Structure formats: C-alpha cells, structure tokens
Image (cartoon, rainbow, N blue to C red):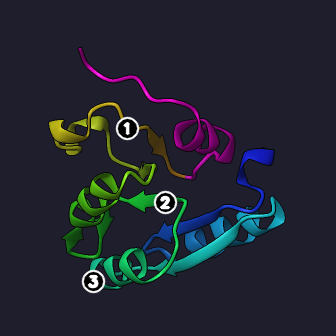
Amino acid sequence: MKMFAGKRVLVVEDEFLLADEARRRLQDLGAHVVGPTARVDRALELVEGQHVDAAILDVFLDDKLVFPVATKLDELGIPFVFATAYDASVIPERFNGYVLCEKPVELEKIARGLFEPRETDG
C-alpha cells in the first residue's frame, strides 16, 4: 500500500460517503487526493489543470458516464481504474485491460491496477 505515498490521485465518485471514505483512506496512505468530484466536467478540469498521477473513476455519475474522463486520462498516459457496482459489460471495449473494481473499492486491488504494468493485447 506504500504505492500511494506521495501520489496525486483523482477521485471521481458521485456517492458522497464512498467518495469521502476513499479520500480519507487514500490520505491515510500518504496520497494527495485531487477532488473528489461527482461531475465529468469538473473531473476534466482537474485533469487538465492539476498534476494527477492516477485516478479512481466511478462509471455512472448521476445521469452521465465517466468515459470522457477515461479517454482524457488514457491520452495523457495517466493510469486509472474503474470502480463500479456494475459488471464489466458496461465498460467499452476500448478500455479492455484497465482494472475494474467492485464497490466498495479495495485499495490494494486499486494500487495494483494503477501502479503495476497492465496487460495489453498483441
């Protein structure tokens, strides 16, 4: 869990209690939390306006999907994981290879997904 120490981790989550719990646990592990935010537009502003080392993304934010944020993070080479109560079928094929964590999130699985090399096709 030392992998989080000193990292700037963006948290995109629309359930306040889950976002607050993730923030608190990440801070306890030495991470600097960016956000949390529950909005796609605000998450994009944070990605473009602040240094972000990694991100934890809830898939469904009220009535919006988080995929524009995932696309931007992917373009910038910033690792991220999806955190959702839904199964993997909700994730576009474009994001195969990214870790999908079930809620409530397990920070150890998230750390491996963010900071260990991911498998790629071909």
Residue 22: x percent and y percent?
A: 64, 65
- Identify the residue under disc 3: 41
Give the SS element for disc 1. Answer: loop
Q: Quadrant of the N terminus?
A: top right
Q: Residue at x 81, y 46 (%)?
A: 2
- Identify the residue under disc 2: 55
Q: Earlier in the sequence, mark 3 or mark 2?
A: 3
Q: Quadrant of residue 28?
A: bottom right
What is the C-alpha distance between the residues marked 3 and 1?
22 Å
Q: Quick one: 119 or 76, which is closer to the camera? A: 76
Q: Residue at x 80, y 63 (%)?
A: 30
What is the C-alpha distance between the residues marked 3 and 2?
15 Å
Residue 16: x percent and y percent?
A: 53, 79
Looking at the rendered structure, the number of numbered marks drawn on it comes to 3
Q: Residue at x 40, y 61 (%)?
A: 58
Q: Earlier in the sequence, mark 2 or mark 1?
A: 2
Q: Earlier in the sequence, mark 3 or mark 1?
A: 3
Q: Residue at x 27, y 64 (%)?
A: 66
Residues drawn in magenta: 104-122
Does residue 30 appear to the left or right of 114 in the view shown? right
Local crowd size for mark 3, using a 10 Å CA cut-off: few (<14), some (14–19), many (≥20): few
